[in-house]
Amino acid sequence: MTAPLWPAFLLLAQLVALLVLLVGVAQNLLYVALMVTALWVMATRPPARRSRALWAGMVDVAPPLSVIVPAYDEELTIEDSVRALLSLQYPDFEVIVVNDGSTDGTLDRLVERFALEPEESAGAGPLPHAPVRRVYRSATNPALRVVDKENGGKADALNAGINLAEGELFCAADADSLLEADSLLRAVQPFVEGGEETIAVGGTVRVANGCPVRGGRVVEVRLPRHPLALLQTVEYMRAFTMARLAFERFGALFIISGAFGIFRREAVLEVGGYSTATVGEDMELVLRLHRFMRERGRRYEIRFVPEPVCWTQVPERLRALARQRIRWHRGALESLAAHRRMLARRRYGTPGSLGLVTLFLLDVLGPAVEAVGYLLMPFLWAAGMLDTGFLLAWLAMTFAFGVVVSIGALVLEEMELRRFPRASHLALLAVTAILENFGYRQLNNLWRIAGHLAYLRGVRGWGRQTRRAFVRA
Amino acid sequence: MLLSAPLVDALSRLIWQLTLVLVLAALLVLLVLVLRRLLEELRRETLARRQAHARRLLLERLRDPAAAPGFPDLPELPADYLIELVDELAQMVRGEGRERLAALGERLGLLDRLLRSLRAWRPGLRVEAARRLAIYRGERVVRALCRALFDRAPQVRLAAATALLDQDGLPVDLLHHARHDPAFSRPGAIGFWQRLAETRPDAFLRLFEEPCPVERRVPMLRAAGVAGLTRLAERMIADTAAPEPAVRRAAVMALLDLKHPLALDALARLLADPDPRLRADAVVAVGRRRLLALLGMVRDRLDDPDPAVRFRAGEAVLRLGQGGGVRAGGRGGP
C-alpha cells in the first residue's frame, strides 16, 4: 500500500470499528428495552388461572377449533403426538393430520393405530394446494381426520388442513411436538376475551430433550443432558419469555412459532393462507396478517400468551442444528424481503417501525457487523491502533452484555413463570447462560451469515430433516 | 487517532464499566433466586404433606352431610395456598357447603387478605381477589367490590361486577356501571351478562330493553340465549333484522339456543344474508346442529358466489348425511 493511502485506510478501519461498537450498543439497548418491557408486562397482567378454573370458565364460550398437524416422515413420533392431541382439554375440537406425501410409514401407522377409514370430502377449499389423494376419519375417534396428499411442503399441507378445518379457529402444530393438556384452553382465552379483533395467538415452545414422555405427555420437566440442547434451552427461554412478550405489548409481534400457533380461520383465508414460497411460512403469515389489516385500517390483535406450552425436540447434532438455523435465517430474510415495504413506514405502525426495524438490526445487520468486529478489533488492538478501553467496551458489548440478557431472561422466568422445578436446574441454566456467549453465540452468528449467503444464492426448500423419538418414561 | 478522542474514550469506559456492574448485579439476583429455591425445596416435602392433609380434611367434611358445621383446625399453611384451596372447593359445591367454606375463610383471615389484595398494585391480583370474593358475604365485601367498580383496569371492574351478582341484593351502582362503562361492552363481558341473566333476569330484561351500542348488544344476546330467557324471544326476532351484521348473527344464534320455533326461519334468512361471513356462519350452524329442515337451502348455497360459503355448504351437506349431492373436484379434491 502506498504511503498516502495508509492514513486513509487507518481512518476507515477506525470508523468501521466505531460503527461496530455503536451497532453493538444499539442491539444491547434494544435487548434491555425488551427485558424491561417483558418484566412490566409480566408484572401487570392477570395471573394465569388453574386448568380446572379455566375449563369451568371456557367450556361454554370456547369456539370450535381444528388442530392441523402437517406430517412428513414422522413415523417415529406421529402416534404419540396424535394421542396427545386427541386427549387435549378443550370442549369442541378436531385433529386434522395432513400426511404431506411421506416416504416412510407415517400413513400406515396412522391407519393401523387409529382405525382410519376413507371418507367423502367436501371438495376443493378456498386455498390452493397439492392434490389430495384421500381423506380418512378414525373409526375409534371421529374427531381425528387424516388427509393424505402429495408432497408440497409444510405451508402447502397447512393450507390443505385449513381448507378442511371445521373450527372457527385453527391451531397449527408440528407433528414432532407435544402440546400440554391445557394449552389450547389457555391460548384460546384471548380469542374469547378479545372477540373477532383477535386474529392470532402464539404460545411458548420449550425444549423436550431429556424430559420423560408418557402417553404423549411430558411427565416431568428435566433439563437436557446434551450440551447443545441445553444451550438451546436458554435460547428458547430468552426468545419466548422476553422478546415475544415485549413485542406483543407494542402490537409488533411478528413471529408465532410454526410449532404452536392459533389463528382465526377467516382472517387467514382472507390473506390467502400460508405462502409456499418461503421456508419461514409462520413468520411470513403473521407479517402478511399485519400488512393486510393495516392497509385496510382494520382493528386487530395478534397476541402472545406465555402459559400454553408446546414441547419440541431440538437437534443434538451440530450439523442438524446448523441446517435448522440456516433455514430459519433464510426464512426470516425471505419474509423480510417479501414485506420490505412495511419497513419503517408509518402506515404499518409498530409492526413496521419497531418489529421489522428490530429484525433488520438484529438479524440482517447484526451478524455481519459482529463478524466484522471479530476480525477487525483484535487486529487493530494488536497493531496499536485501538485503545484498551475501546477494546474492553467492544468485549463488554459482545460477550458480557449477552450474559446480562440471558440471566435477565432467566430471572424473569423464575420470578413470574417458575417452570423449572429444581434449584439445580436454575444453577445449571445460569452457567449455560454465561457459557453460551463464548463459542455458541459465535457459531450462531456464523450460521446466520451462512443463511444470508444461502438467501442471496437463491436456495429454496427445507433440505433434509432428522427425526428423533421422545424419551419414554 | 479517531478512537482516542476524549468523547470516544469516555464512552468506551462508561460502556465496559456499566456492563460489568450489570453482569455482577444480574449474577447476584440470580444467586438470591437459586438460594430461595433451595430453601423452598428443603421445606417442600413437609409443605406437600400438610397441603394434602388439609385438602383431605376439607373434602371429607364437605362430602359428609351429617358432619358438624364448621371445619376442624387445619395444619399451618401459607395463606396463598389456603385461598386457592378454598376457591377450588367453592367451585365444586353450592349452598350450605359454600357458606361453610366462606366461614372458614373468614376464620382463617383469608377474607381480610383478599380485601387487601383488591387494592394491590398488580391488576392480575386485583382480578383474582375480586373473583374469589364472590363466595363471601357481608357489608365489607359489598363495599370493597363496589369500590372496585371504579378500578382503572376493565378486567377488575368486570370481575368485581360479576362477584357482586353473588351477593344478596343488587347495588344500584352496578346497573349504572353496566349501562355506561365500556368494559361491559367487551366480548369478555359475556360472563357477567350471562350471570346477570341467570341470577337477576328482571334487571337483565330491563337493560336489554334499553337502546345500547352494538358491542354490548352482542354479548347480551348471546348471554340471553345461553341463559334460556325465552321472554326475550320477540326482541331477538326483531334483532335478526338489525342493520349490524354482528347483531343479526348473535340474535339468530340466541334464538337457536332457545330452540325457538321461529329460529329456523331466522336462520333461513341468515342463509340469504348479503354478508358472506354471515351466510358461512349460518351454513355451519345448520350442519353442526343437524337442522335437516334447512338442507334444501344449504344445498342452494353450494352455488354461492363466495368460495368460503360454497365450501362450508359442502361440509354442512356432508354432516347432514346427504353427501351424494357433492362431487369433489379440482385441486385439493380427493
Image: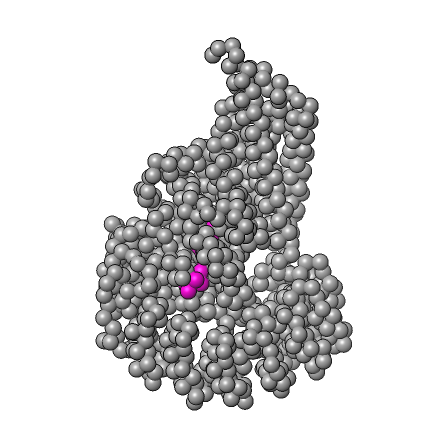
Residue B196 percent across, percent down from the top left: 61, 80
Extreme residue in the top direction: A3
- Residue B192 falls left or right of residue A260: right
The image quadrant of residue A48 is: bottom right
Residue occupying image coordinates x 50% and y 31%: A369
The image quadrant of residue A403 is: top right
- Residue A332 falls left or right of residue B132: left
Query: In the displayed structure, would residue B294 be above or below residue A30?
Result: below
Residue occupying image coordinates x 51% and y 35%: A366
Query: In the displayed structure, would residue A202 be above or below residue A119?
Result: above
Residue A182 in view (yes/no): no
Residue A375 percent across, percent down from the top left: 49, 24
The image quadrant of residue B213 is: bottom right
Residue occupying image coordinates x 67% and y 38%: B25
Residue A210 percent across, percent down from the top left: 45, 45
Was residue A201 drawn as part of the magenta stretch in this picture? no
B240 or A242, which lies in front? B240
Colour theme = one colour
Residue occupying image coordinates x 45% and y 41%: A229
Write the start and end of the magenta stretch as one range. A255-267
- Residue A308 falls left or right of residue B23: left
